[in-house]
Image: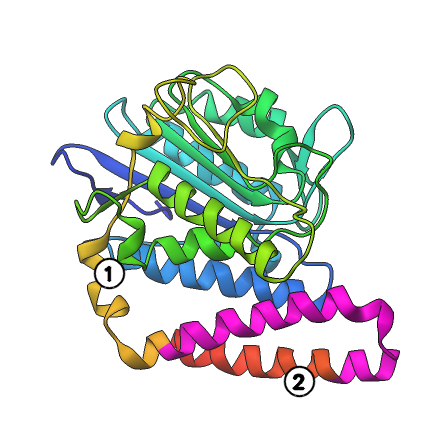
Amino acid sequence: MGLIAVAAIAAHAESYYLVVAGLGGEAEYEQRFTGWASDLTKLLKAEPNSKVETLSGNSATKANIEAKMREVAAASKADDQFVMLLMGHGSYDEQDYKFNIPGPDISAKELGALLDKIAAKEAVILMTSSSGGAIPSLQKPKRVLVTATKSGTEKNATIFARYFIEALRDKEADTDKSETLTVQEAFHYAEQKTAKFFESQKRLATEHALIEDTGKGEGVKDPSPENGEGLTAGRFALLHLGAVAALVNDPEKQKLLKHKEDLEAAIDQLKYEKASMALPQYRQQMQEYLLDLAKTQEALDK
């Protein structure tokens, strides 16, 4: 089986993860999405006894996603966990969300039908544009659902994935210091970091992440006993931080990660300033950033 199957907290339970990086459409997005998928894969591989397979580029097809989810449906039990993490671009046609991949896109309704056949506890992390449009099709009691946007109409490329992945390597995300990062802790960390990014850039926020785990409602940004959200997400272990200590404590890797984040922020800012720049200047600066980003990612992957 190509998916991760690692021991969860209970010795008899299994945790299955499926990471998919969709189409970028432009060079900077292609590189960003595949880089994020590589970072995420590396962090998950740090889990003891883990086996990781990531679908990206030409392998991230509808047929392959369906095949992997059917594998989980056949192998998993009610005590197991399944985490699906999608990053890239999404679209929304006022009726359904679609994840943009090579060949035919896959819709939220299609993903929901596949998820309904899986017995394991589920967490679905949609880190794409327009992902809020998937909530009506994917929400289900006790299924944890995270979206990078609050609706299908927030169509700009998102940066939520950057900070969700950062949460997996930052000990500060583990707010209760249990060395077990829950989906709710990772969401809270990434939602706050994303909001601060737009504030620091003095830009109007074009994405507002939500979490939903009751199977009803529109999702919230602040799960609490008052709104009834977060009980399942707060108990859903995403990663054990002690297992990634080597990565976290490697000074050289930390420098590279910081440089990568700075480059991604610079690329975001450059795209924002494109309209006020001469096209040759924009293209030259973008090329320099992308070359630097590729070299940084290559060093991180070693």
Q: Where is residue 177 in the image (x, y as percent from the top left)?
A: 18, 47
Considering the whole magenta stretch, tell me its main secondary structure: helix
- Distance, label 1 to label 2, CA atoms, is 31 Å
Residue at the left extreme, as displayed: 11
Spot occupied by residue 199 in the image (x, y as percentages of width and height): 59, 55
Please, what secondary structure does the residue beneath circle 1 have? helix
Q: Earlier in the sequence, mark 1 or mark 2?
A: 1
All told, the count of numbered labels is: 2
Provide the residue designation for mark 2.
Answer: 288
Q: Considering only vertical position in the picture, is 168 above or below 264?
A: above
Quadrant holding the N terminus: top left
The residue that appears at 64% across and 64% down in the rendered structure is: 30
Residue drawn 36% across the image and 35% down it: 82
Quadrant housing residue 26: bottom right
Image position, residue 237 (x, y; %): 27, 38
Query: Who's the residue at 26% across and 56% down the image?
Result: 171
Looking at the picture, how far across and down is residue 259, in whole percent? 47, 77
Residue of label 1 = 244
- Amino acid under disc 2: Glu
- Disc 2 packing (10 Å; few <14; some 14–19; many ≥20): few
- Pick the residue in front: 1 or 203: 203
Residue at position x 40%, y 58% in the image: 166
Q: Is residue 260 magenta?
A: yes
Question: Over which residues does the magenta segment extend?
Answer: 255-284
Q: What residue type is labelled 1?
A: Val
Q: In which quarter of the image is residue 75?
A: top left
Is 153 covered by the magenta stretch?
A: no
Give the secondary structure at mark 2: helix
